[in-house]
Image: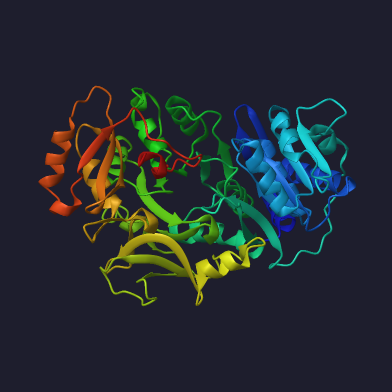
Amino acid sequence: MIIGETLKKTAQEYGEKAAVIWGEKKLSFSELYERMNRLSHGMKDLGIKQGDRVALILPNSIQFEESYLATVNLGGIAMPIDVRTKAQELRDILSDAGTAALITTNQFTQLVEEAGKGLDFLKNIIVSGYEGDKFVSYEKLVEQGTPEEMEVDIKGDDEALYLYTSGTTGRPKGVVLTFDQLDLFPETINKVLDIAGEDVNGILLPMSHISGPIYCNISIVYGMTMVIFEQLSPDSILGAIEKHGVTWTHGVPPIFSMILKSPNIKKFDTSSLRIAAMMGMTVPPELMKAFQENFPHTKMIQGYGLTETSPLLTLTYLKDADRKMSSIGKAVPRAEVAIMDEKGALLPVGEVGEIVAKGPQIMKGYHNQPEMTAEIIRDGWFHTGDIGKCDEDGYFYHMGRKDDMIITGGLNVYPAEVENLLAQHPAVGEVAVVGVPDEKRGAVIKAVVVLKKGAEAGEKDLIKYCREKLTNYKVPQMVEFRDSLPRTGTGKVQKTELTK
């Protein structure tokens, strides 16, 4: 996808239709196209050129969309970075990429100054809401830039995105995606879910991860209105769905669980919401059922993928939504997904192994890390590190991370199986299962549980519940109760924190 050409066509066709809504602020496609060009030209006037890396340290906002589009419109490489990143982490990322420019808001200038100190390659810091002389004013850049179309020769295999993910080595991993790969999410969502221009997308996830670029891409491809929720509180989300007629959204289970806790669900008209996808981690089937009971007009589906896979590999087709609720879906168009054993042999239906994939979705590689790239892409297969199985209909089931698998007494236990069972207990609100080192058995199983508000259950109660439904070696030997589970910025449980 060539962003400038795509948005130009959409602006010509949809003109004054709302492209993005954020609280009381709204931009039409014509306005978005003009502001994108103004910002691109303003950045070019600063000396930012095609191929330069531009870090985006921005919260969910209109400025994020404008900055992302303007960067890739210029032929630059956009680098969305979580605003919760600490100074040293940010410095490592900026250094790894050789970042030429950075766009942020007044709120994060102290973080940026600390992280960027002494980095000579970081030539420009552009700040929204800033009026001094130390940094470049975002608003003045947009105001002074020409609205003319940006002329730049961009090829499909040029690099468009660096998306940094956490690594076990301590060194940041920059996932490299190309301009051609920007087309894949819009294509998949349209073909599998029949989502197009008349739909309205509600944004629940941080735009600073891969979600931001893919939301922006699908919006400008189909002329689809994008609603950025101002706050992630249940009533704020439900109110925005009602006000703007949001038709589809996707998020991680904790967000949907939070919505279900609102006592005001029935006070909002959410009949426009036809699709809600739970993604990003193992999803408890009971949570999906509970959400559908409260939103009977909404099809509940799952999808699966990684930043390295642009990001979708599997998705549940709407016609199968009810009967395949516990599945992460089947392979999306143009992706080949399979289950592989540790020796590299593909496994038949029903066998458990690692989820692997091929196709144009797979990243170009990790920036400046050819060894790590070669380690994860072997013989053409991308190794996800996730454990799963496939049924006779081609639907896949996620059973946890490969490195989360618990080997107890020489037997393999997949945490997701135990977690999904415990999630069905009427007193359990959230649960995570981990292995704790043990001299005799190698590891024993521990369940960390957050009880529902007002509910009561003891360790013996939950162990007995598991013993009635699981093979003995899969039953937790201990249960720890907590007020909450530690999570990453994208909502994933930090299991390493639970083994301590």
Q: Quadrant of the N terminus?
A: bottom right
Looking at the image, which residue is at 48% across and 40% down?
488
Near-viewer residue (357 or 303): 357
Residue 417 on image: x %, y %: 25, 52
Q: Is residue 426 above or below residue 445?
A: above
Residue 184 seen in the current view? yes
Where is residue 283 shown, x and y percent of the image? 34, 47
Residue 289's x, y, as percent?
Answer: 27, 42
- Answer left or right for 194 relative to 261: right
Quarter of the figure with residue 122: top right
Colouring mode (rainbow / by chain / secondary structure / one colour): rainbow
**Which of the 4 quarters of the picture holds residue 389?**
bottom left
The residue lying toward the viewer, choosing from 162 and 462, is 462
In the displayed structure, would residue 406 be above or below residue 464? Answer: below
User: Given the current orientation, which residue lies at the most extreme left position?
Assistant: 468
Going by the image, does 421 lie left or right of 436?
left
**x 37%, y 65%: residue:** 354
Residue 15 in sight here: no
Numbered circles on residues, count: 0
Q: On the image, which quarter does residue 365 sit in?
A: bottom right
Residue 195 position in % (x across, y down): 49, 53
Residue sitting farthest toward the front:
439
* Drawn side of residue 48 relative to residue 256, left or right: right
Check the picture and name the quadrant holding the C terminus: top left
